[in-house]
Amino acid sequence: MLNKIMLIGRLGKDPDFRTTPTGMAVARFSLATDEKRRSDSGELTSKTEWHRIVFFRRQAEVARDFLRKGSLIYLEGKIHYDSYDNKDGQKIYTTEILGDNFQMLDSRSDRGRSDEPAESISSSGGIIESNVRKPVDDEIAADDDLPF
């Protein structure tokens, strides 16, 4: 059996980082993927899909340290479906992507200084050097391609 998803998109907000009572790091954020098409009339249309992403342990710490709203990333993970009963007793269904690893795709010029190292991290906890670094907020704000 196979449950694998690969996405390239931009963060909708800075990662929400927390630590569980047992000390496990958890980072959650939304990721926007965008599909552009030409309609029958030749008009360019765009459809944005939003995905709820969750990383654990070391990947969560790296996400907290290096990802910001607007960061362009490639990620691999698996789809996780869950449900719970809300306060009114209604069943609520959720879909999340449990991240295995990610890589930052912003170009060096998009991130500012090129001498600050960053990491990609795999689900096994191994760090992969990728010569990427933390984006600078004012540079992200200038990006007109953001889907939000």
Image: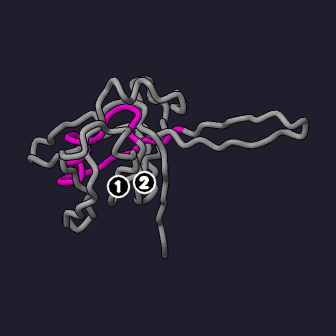
Which amino acid type corresponds to the residue marked 2 in the rendered image?
Tyr
Asked if the magenta segment contains residue 90, the reply would be no
Q: Could you say where residue 96 lies in the image, as x and y percent from the top left? A: 43, 47
> On the image, which quarter does residue 101 sit in?
bottom left
Q: Is residue 88 left or right of residue 57?
A: right
Say above or below: 147 vs 107. Answer: above
- Residue 8 % position (x, y): 49, 51
Residue at the spot x=49%, y=31% of the render?
90
Q: Secondary structure at mark 2?
A: strand
Query: Tag 1, which secondary structure?
Result: strand
| Numbered label attached to residue 63 | none
Q: Is residue 49 above or below residue 13?
A: below
Q: Is residue 47 left or right of residue 12?
A: right
- Residue that badge 1 annotates: 103
Residue at position x 86%, y 37% in the image: 42
Q: How many marks?
A: 2
Q: Residue 94, percent across and down?
A: 46, 42
Considering depth in this image, is 20 or 111 the residue closer to the camera? 111
> In terms of depth relative to the viewer, which is nearer, 43 or 34?
43
Task: Using the rendered view, name the quadrant where residue 68 is placed.
Answer: top left
Q: What residue sits 37% from the left and 31% below the top?
A: 69
Mark 2 burial class by Cα count in 10 Å: few <14, some 14-19, many 20+: some
Residue at the outermost bottom position:
1
Q: Is residue 129 above or below residue 33?
A: below
Residue beneath disc 2: 74
Residue at 19 percent across and 66 percent down: it is 126
The type of residue carrying mark 1 is Gln
Q: Which residues are magenta?
A: 50-71
The crowd level at tag 1 (other Cα within 10 Å; few <14, some 14-19, many 20+) is many
Sequence-wise first label, 2 or 1: 2
Q: Is residue 148 left or right of residue 68?
A: right
Q: Are marks 2 and 1 in contact (CB under 8 Å)?
A: yes
